Every structure is written in C-alpha cells, then in structure tokens.
Image (cartoon, grey):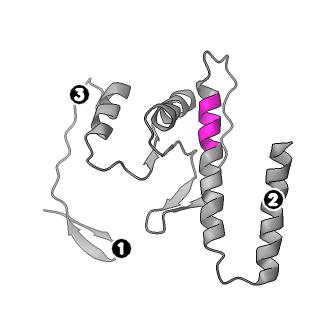
Amino acid sequence: MKNVKLFNEAITVQAEINVLPGVSGHADKNGLIAWLKGFETKPKLIFVNHGDPEAADAFTACLNGELGYNAYAPYSGTSYDLLRGEFVRETEGKPIEKKVIGDYRAVAAFSKLIAAAERLLSVAQKCKGRTNKDLARFTDQINAVADKMER
C-alpha cells in the first residue's frame, strides 16, 4: 500500500483507481443531486468545479435556490482554506457572453451576492479586538454600500 502525507501526517491510501474506457466517469445532474441527498447532514459548502461556466452556474443556482444547499462555482485560481472555512483568494472569470435562455444566470448572480455577503459577515466577525477607529471605518464602509444598494 502507498502512503501520502497530509498536514505532516502519513496516511495509508486504501483506494484503487479504475478506468471506465469510453464511458463518462461522473454522474449527471440528477445523479449528483441523488448523491447529495444521501448525506444524513447537508454539507456546509459545495464546490461545483466541472462543466462549462454556464452549466456550473446553473447547477450551482439549482443547488442554492431549489434545494437549499450552499454551493459555489469557483473560477480557476480561487483558493479556499478548509481548516479556517474561508476563501483565501477569489478570482473573477471572463465568461463568453452567450444568448441566455431562462433566468438561471440571475439566480447564479444572486447566489454569488449571498456568498459575498456571507464572506463579509465572516470578515466582520473576525474583527473583534481591533481598534475602535478601525471598527468605525469598516462599519462606515459597509453602511455606505448598504445605503447605495437601498436607493
């Protein structure tokens, strides 16, 4: 058996890799949803990282809007720290504009807005102990954005 080192700990690999010649090795949308529904406890965050951007965004929107999961479709270069539960780096993609059928892009855009707001809340919660001046400046910045969006 082979070992891999994760976080300075030797882990014995107890898996084997098989190839399915001429057959797709991943499930379709319904298969993935059925797999997710098999968990006793919903995953805290799901990363959708397969398919073209439109399909990934649509599947992410379905998971978020229709099924109540917290899903995110990162662009290449995005980093997420699993131990801290936060994004280290988020990148922006440059998708090719195509004619859109339906409103799944609007749902995907809203999902990204909610994810950004949750990230902002996470950052704010980590500000405990900072100077009153820093906290006041950060609060003013957040309120200015909120005021602008409410107009």
Q: Position of residue 36 (x, y in %)?
A: 32, 39
N-term mark: 3 or 2: 3
The disc labelled 1 sits on which kind of residue?
A: Phe
Residue identified by numbered label 2: 143
Answer with the quarter of the image where residue 14 lies.
bottom left
Nearest the eye: 16 or 41 = 41
Q: Secondary structure at mark 1?
A: loop
Main SS of the magenta segment?
helix
Residue identified by numbered label 1: 7
The disc labelled 3 sits on which kind of residue?
A: Pro
What residue is shown at x 56% (from left), y 46% (from top)? 76
Nearest to the eye among marks 2 and 1: give it.
Answer: 2
**CA–CA distance in space, label 3 to label 2:** 56 Å
Q: Position of residue 133 (x, y in %)?
A: 82, 80
Q: Circles 3 and 2: CB distance less than 8 Å?
A: no
Residue identified by numbered label 3: 21
Horizontal relation, residue 118 to residue 63: left or right: right
The stretch of residues the image draws in magenta is: 106-112
The disc labelled 2 sits on which kind of residue?
A: Asn
